[in-house]
Image (cartoon, helix red, strand yellow):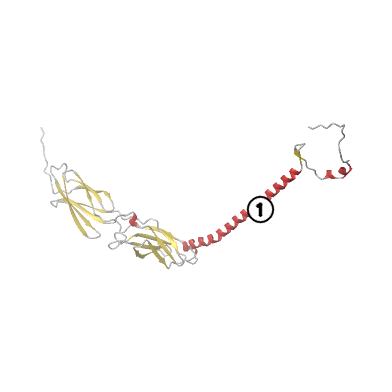
């Protein structure tokens, strides 16, 4: 014997397993399950989104008969914080969670250019890679002094550079640049950080690395140029002497060439002494002596 029992759905139960699937800069995908399995009719859900930074509320209505419901919350702000509440439309028990959207990314190519009595921070415009960023929002700059262990807010700008003065000798600094924080510093972009320790030698602030590199280059480049010119002149002189010696030797060898022997004959100088004077001079040939020509 058996009996079939069908439970009466309880619409006062809250949605189950509410969680975030994916969070971006301006949207969040959430998912939950119905209060009971296999609903036999469309169920109306109320999704309330409370902006914890702006202190505003928005309510969205979602109708679905599926046991698992997925919904995308749009028009959120980068770096925002939200409280999400999901419940049935009859204001039954609720399920809630908190989500934070992805902040704006850090500016690219942050670098330092050193001037005589100050430095300049440069970076690429964040609008080049962030469609949600407007240059009118601007950037804010912070500085951390590792020797004093303090962080200072230097200011904000809508430009892509910032001037920093009054740096102390012997101090190391870290500079951060990020999209300007909104609503009491609660919605900020990711910071780009750069370490600056050029003043650690204790020298004057104008004697920074770029300046020293320029001075060294001004000395080394002319010296190298002079060395190259000297080497070139030396090679030319050696080449001319070599050519002169080669030509002299060729002329000397040609003057001592014997067409009969087919080679050049050189004398050491000792053979040119008295023997040449004692040898009789050949003045002619006798008609009865045959001449053989090789």
64 and 119: which one is in front? Answer: 119
Pick out the residue farthest to the front.
287
Residue under the image location 48 percent in, 61 percent down: 210
Within 10 Å of disc 1 (Cα), the crowding (few <14, some 14-19, many 20+) is few
Of 228 and 14, nearer the camera is: 228
Q: Residue at x 22, y 53 (%)?
A: 84
Q: Secondary structure at mark 1?
A: helix
Q: Nearer the viewer, residue 20 or 187?
A: 187
Left or right of residue 177: residue 256: right
Q: Quadrant of the N terminus?
A: top left
Q: Is residue 207 above or below residue 259?
A: below
For the C terminus, the image quarter is top right
Query: Which residue is at 53% across, 59% downward?
Result: 217
User: In the rendering, at what x and y percent does residue 93 appear?
Assistant: 16, 51
Question: What residue is pinned by disc 1?
Answer: 237
Q: Position of residue 140 (x, y in %)?
A: 34, 62
Image position, residue 249 (x, y; %): 72, 46
Left or right, residue 202 beside residue 33:
right
Question: Residue 2, how many percent across, how many down?
Answer: 11, 34
Does residue 15 appear left or right of residue 254 in this picture? left
Quarter-of-image position of residue 273: top right
| Side of 236 where 150 appears, left or right | left
Task: Give the total of numbered labels.
Answer: 1
């Amino acid at each position: 014997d058996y009996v079939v029992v069908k439970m009466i759905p309880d619409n006062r139960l809250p949605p189950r397993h509410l969680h975030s699937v994916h969070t971006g800069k301006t949207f969040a995908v959430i998912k939950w399950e119905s209060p009971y399995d296999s609903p036999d009719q469309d169920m109306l859900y109320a999704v309330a989104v409370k902006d914890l930074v702006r202190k505003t509320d928005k309510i969205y209505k979602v109708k679905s008969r599926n046991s698992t419901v997925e919904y995308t919350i749009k028009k959120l702000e980068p770096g925002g914080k939200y409280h999400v509440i999901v419940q049935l439309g009859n204001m039954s028990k609720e399920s809630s969670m908190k989500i934070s959207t992805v902040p704006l990314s850090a500016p690219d190519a942050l670098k330092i250019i050193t001037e005589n009595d100050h430095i300049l921070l440069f970076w690429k415009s964040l609008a080049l890679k962030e469609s949600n960023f407007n240059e009118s929002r601007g950037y804010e700059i912070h500085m951390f002094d590792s020797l004093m262990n303090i962080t200072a807010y230097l200011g904000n700008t809508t430009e892509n550079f910032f001037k920093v003065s009054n740096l102390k000798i012997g101090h190391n600094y870290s500079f951060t640049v990020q999209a300007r924080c909104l609503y009491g510093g609660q919605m900020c972009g990711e910071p780009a950080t750069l370490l600056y320790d050029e003043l650690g030698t204790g020298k004057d602030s104008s004697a920074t690395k770029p300046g020293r590199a320029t001075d060294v280059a001004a000395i080394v480049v002319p010296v190298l140029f002079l060395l190259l010119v000297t080497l070139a002149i030396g090679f030319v002189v050696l080449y001319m002497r070599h050519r002169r010696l080669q030509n002299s030797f060729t002329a000397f060898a040609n003057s001592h060439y014997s067409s009969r022997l087919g080679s050049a004959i050189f004398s050491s100088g000792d053979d040119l002494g008295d023997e040449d004077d004692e040898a009789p001079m050949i003045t002619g040939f006798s008609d009865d002596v045959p001449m053989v020509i090789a």
